[in-house]
């Protein structure tokens, strides 16, 4: 029985690795397999695990990284018609590395890591100068704002509508513009090219 369990676990890890590698994460900014703080040499394990996953996380499968508990200063503007609260959903997963409060090597139950994100990838907890996230982007907001396309009817350029391809429960999140697995192969892990502001103009009617 133990042999079967080990075999199943091994096959699952291989499957997850093949799916992820097929999405071009290998060699991307999220390929941590050669980092000294990841002695396992595995790509997926920093974020995902087949066993003992964090079941409190509903926005990512088999989550394995410590979550941030930071409170953020969020984007605010007199011209913004959306209500922006604290980051939630899948964006919280991104910020668990990118806000700099949780060590990169805090995964697999480890909470005393010493390697923190730095450089341009460090967003910090002051998000007031970053694109707003975790707000509802729907037909009502598009109508009220006047400078946004209706996400329920506008083509995303990714195969369906903005709502279907880029929003998470009608909310715009970090992953609306960035694909952590580098599925498109575009620089900065973008979901599609921003040449001539194409990504921005997917939503913004300018």
Image (cartoon, rainbow, N blue to C red):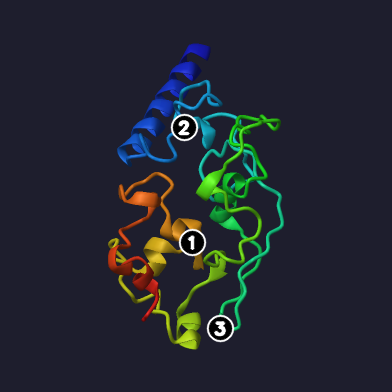
| Residue marked by disc 1 | 168
Counting from the top left corner in percent of width and height, residue 192 is at 32, 58
| Residue marked by disc 2 | 32
Q: Is residue 18 left or right of residue 73?
A: left
Tag 3's secondary structure?
loop
Tag 2's secondary structure?
loop
The quadrant of the image that shows the C terminus is: bottom left
Please give the label number shown on residue 185. none
Answer with mark 2 or mark 1, whichever residue precedes in sequence.
2
Residue 111 lies, with reference to residue 155, above or below; the image says above
Residue 124 lies, with reference to residue 200, above or below; the image says above
Counting from the top left corner in percent of width and height, residue 175 is at 46, 56
Mark 1 vs mark 3, CA separation in Å: 24 Å
| Badge 3 density bin: few <14, some 14–19, many ≥20, Cα 10 Å | few
Residue at 36% of width from left, 46% of height from top? 182
Please give the label number shown on residue 79. 3
Q: Is residue 166 left or right of residue 95?
A: left
Whether pointer 1 and pointer 3 mark residues with C-beta atoms closer than 8 Å, the reply is no
Counting from the top left corner in percent of width and height, residue 98 is at 57, 48
Which of the 4 image quarters holds residue 76?
Answer: bottom right
Residue 19: in sight, yes or no?
Answer: yes
């Amino acid at each position: 029985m133990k042999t079967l369990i080990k075999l199943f676990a091994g096959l699952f890890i291989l499957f997850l690795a093949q799916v992820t590698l097929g999405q071009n994460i290998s060699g991307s900014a999220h390929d941590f397999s050669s980092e000294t703080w990841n002695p396992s040499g595995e790509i997926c394990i920093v974020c995902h695990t087949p066993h003992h996953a964090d079941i409190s996380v509903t926005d990512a499968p088999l989550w394995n990284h410590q979550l941030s508990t930071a409170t953020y200063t969020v984007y605010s503007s007199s011209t913004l018609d959306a209500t922006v609260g604290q980051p939630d959903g899948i964006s919280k997963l991104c910020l668990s590395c990118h806000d700099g409060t949780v060590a990169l090597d805090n995964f697999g139950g480890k909470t005393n890591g010493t390697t923190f994100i730095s450089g341009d990838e460090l967003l910090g907890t002051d998000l007031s100068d970053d694109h707003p996230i975790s707000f509802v982007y729907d037909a009502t907001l598009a109508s009220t704002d006047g400078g946004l396309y209706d996400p329920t009817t506008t083509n995303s350029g990714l195969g369906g509508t903005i709502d279907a391809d880029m929003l998470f429960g009608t909310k715009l999140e970090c992953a609306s513009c960035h694909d952590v697995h580098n599925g498109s192969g575009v620089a900065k892990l973008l979901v599609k090219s921003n040449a001539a502001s194409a990504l921005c103009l997917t939503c913004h009617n300018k």
